Image: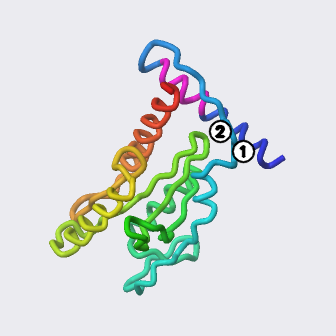
Amino acid sequence: MRLKLERDNYVSILTRLEGEWLRRYDSPCGSLKLRHYGQTPNRMLFENLVERTNSHEFKTPVFYNGEPYRSKLEADFARLMDDYGILYKYEPEILVVGNRKKCPDFMIYLPWIDLLILVEICGSCNNTDYLEYMRDKNHEYLLSGWRPGSNMILFYYDDKMPYIPEMVMEEIETVELRKYMTLINK
């Protein structure tokens, strides 16, 4: 019963996306089939990710829902995902090129289009050493098949840049729409 309710919810989201397509492009789009619902490799990968595997110490944790996050930016992101009902895992361990283990800040999953998105929130953009570290880490993601704007989102903040939830959701919706458009063109 739960799976049917979840599927119905995803169908309503697809209907919303199709309506958005029609408004934007003034022509109907093909409809998506929810083949193998709940059994896709992306869904199984997401379900098997273990959260909070990063062994680095929390220097000054920020708490949300009783759980520690490394920064206010990350705690705000988790809160935003909860507000929008988006599934996420915080600091799960994934394998990248060369069988190296990395812990991105978040992995989010949009089951209505079977999209797994790696999210990195870079909050110390005025620190050169940190930026070099993130450059190398993101390079490993690229070599492993993660692509900005396709299945990876990178957010860069410095001390003076405000956190704007609408901008975060706009980035996620852009990736979602891009995936949706590739699905209907198959």
Secondary structure at numbered mark 1: helix
Q: Are marks 1 and 2 in contact (CB under 8 Å)?
A: yes
Q: Nearer the viewer, residue 45 or 67?
A: 45
- Measured as percent of width and height from the top left, residue 104 is found at 42, 66
Q: Nearer the viewer, residue 29 or 163?
A: 29
Question: Which residue, as the protein is rendered here, is positioned at the far right?
Answer: 1
**Residue bearing mark 1:** 6
Which of the colour schemes (rainbow, by chain, secondary structure, one colour) is used? rainbow
Give the amino acid type for the residue marked by disc 2 in the picture: Tyr
Q: Pointer 1: residues within 10 angstroms few (<14), some, or many (20+)?
A: few
Mark 2, residue position:
10
Is residue 29 rendered to the left or right of residue 76? right
Res 140 → quadrant: bottom left
Q: Seen in the image, is 82 located left or right of residue 124?
A: right
> Magenta span covers which residues?
14-22
Q: Dot 2 lies on which element? A: helix
Whether residue 182 is situated above or below residue 45 in the rendered picture: above
Q: Relative to 40, does residue 156 appear above or below in the rendering?
A: below
Locate residue 108, reporting x and y percent: 51, 55
In-front residue for pair 19/60: 19
Q: Amino acid at mark 1?
A: Glu
Q: Is residue 176 magenta?
A: no
> CA–CA distance between discs 1 and 2?
6 Å
